[in-house]
Image (cartoon, rainbow, N blue to C red):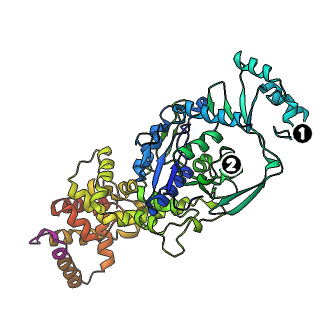
Amino acid sequence: MNQERPVRVRFAPSPTGPLHIGGVRTALYNYLFARQHGGQLVFRIEDTDSARFVPGAEQYIIESFRWLGIKFDEGVSFGGEHGPYRQSERRDIYKKYVQQLLDAGKAYIAFDTPEELAAKREEIKNFQYDATTRGLMRNALTLPAEEVERLVRSGENYVVRFKIEPGEDVVVNDIIRGEVHINSSVLDDKVLYKSADELPTYHLANIVDDHLMEISHVIRGEEWLPSAPLHVLLYRAFGWEDTMPQFAHLPLLLKPDGKGKLSKRDGDRLGFPVFPLEWHDPQTGDVSRGYREDGYLPEAVVNFLALLGWNPGTEQELLTMDELIAQFDLHKCSKSGAKFDYVKAAWFNHEYILSTPDEQLVPAFDAILRREGIEAQPARVQEVVRMMKSRVNFIHELWPLCRFFFVAPTEYDEKTVRKRWKEYSPQQMQELCTVLEALPDFEQQTQEEAVNAWIAKNDYKMGDVMNAWRLTLVGEGKGPHMYEISYFLGREETLQRMRRAIKTLNIKQ
């Protein structure tokens, strides 16, 4: 391959449903590689399997990448000079290359029906359509040319198969796995084209598209590695060896526990999403969780995924997109699968919440407040976020922790009452009300100085006072520093809550 070729990579999903998180990681690695090398990322849709097409899937995929901040340079919905970018719109292009292989004797027409193929599988153990069995089948290699022409003219359904020559050593040069050697004798004569829908299969369409779209590197999941030798042979058959892309097959994403590839069932079983956005199945009506709707920040998802199967060779875990682009190296990708640590994903989200400016988190928390019937000034919402965001992994976890900022308690946690409300607490809280009411202002420092002086003068225990005071304002033993709570509530609300609690808890006693 010409090493001076501009870097052009592609992500080519099928619109058969929601985008799996493993596909997101593949697209991310392509994006990082392209940006690091000043190259381009192409978005192509593989929709040649019309029977599996799901309405809305294509737009879902595009919206997922928009949310994640993974930007394409050309392709479906982005434009470009190598279109069309949907494979279903490239039928005539593929037909030309199918004919080229047929004319060169590199492929042949086969008329075997599904029933005939099933019968042959019953007859021959481990049957595959290849050099040892093709002579037993109904194809252009066994039928007279006139019969082949007649069958085609009559509208008989047929497929075009790639003619694999046995005994050839096929070498796949993989950036991650090194040289992979496969003997062509183990390969079958793959179907490249089906006359029934006039569309190619994955194998032919991808080779033609990668060539015409000048793709320099194919970065894809490990599950596609078995297809690589066939693709190498197809490049040779077309005489395109000089433009063959370099391959890089990424390690699988594995179950968090046990063995095998990560699946939606694992997410359902363990309580985490495997799709970037919430997915509403148009056929069944089922709703699947998404990282966006579960409260993950897109930057956290990107950082988490980038380190599943690759690391920069340092102890650094928190990396911005720019840092990932600068440090990404396909040679440092693991050959073995990466266990999907959903607990670590929540940790990443926590860290990104901490580093995100408070004002940027306000809209998400404000939406939660409004669903709870709370309307608050943005500045007050931001202040609560500032005080409490260090305690959560997700913004939606703020509401149960922060409810007391917006709604006065009407009940008091029994366990906290038994532990923190002493027989002398009502008297101390009455005195504290008097201290707070007499303050010239309600600034935190003013409160703290006056309350500390009052506690010292009366030889009270700081813990007893503060724990009882917290109970009166919050209803239980949680929350930030007491002076932050009282300052946020303001003098009037603070005193109202304290007097209500004194009255209520005295009745209970």
Say whether residue 428 is magenta.
no
Q: Is residue 111 above or below residue 294?
A: above
Report the residue at 62% width, 36% height from top: 97
Report the residue at 35% width, 58% height from top: 412
Q: Residues within 10 Å of mark 2 (few under 14, many from 20)?
A: few
Mark with earlier residue (1, 2): 1
Name the image quarter holding the C terminus.
bottom left
- The quadrant where residue 92 appears: top right
Name the image quarter holding the N terminus.
bottom right
Residue 160 visible, this angle: yes
Q: Nearer the viewer, residue 174 or 263?
A: 174
> Relative to 95, is 461 on the left or the right?
left
Q: Is residue 435 above or below residue 233?
A: below
Residue range in magenta is 436-447
Residue 417 visible, this angle: no
**At which x and y percent is residue 209?**
56, 42
- The quadrant where residue 446 appears: bottom left
Return the residue at label 2.
236
Q: Nearer the viewer, residue 165 or 377?
A: 165
Circles 1 and 2: CB atoms closer than 8 Å: no
Q: Residue furthest left?
A: 440
Q: Amino acid at mark 1?
A: Lys
Report the residue at 66% width, 24% height from top: 196
Q: Nearer the viewer, residue 381 or 252?
A: 252
Q: Amino acid at mark 2?
A: Arg
* Residue 125: numbered disc: 1
> Relative to 176, is 106 on the left or the right?
right
> From mark 1 to mark 2, how far is it between C-alphas?
31 Å
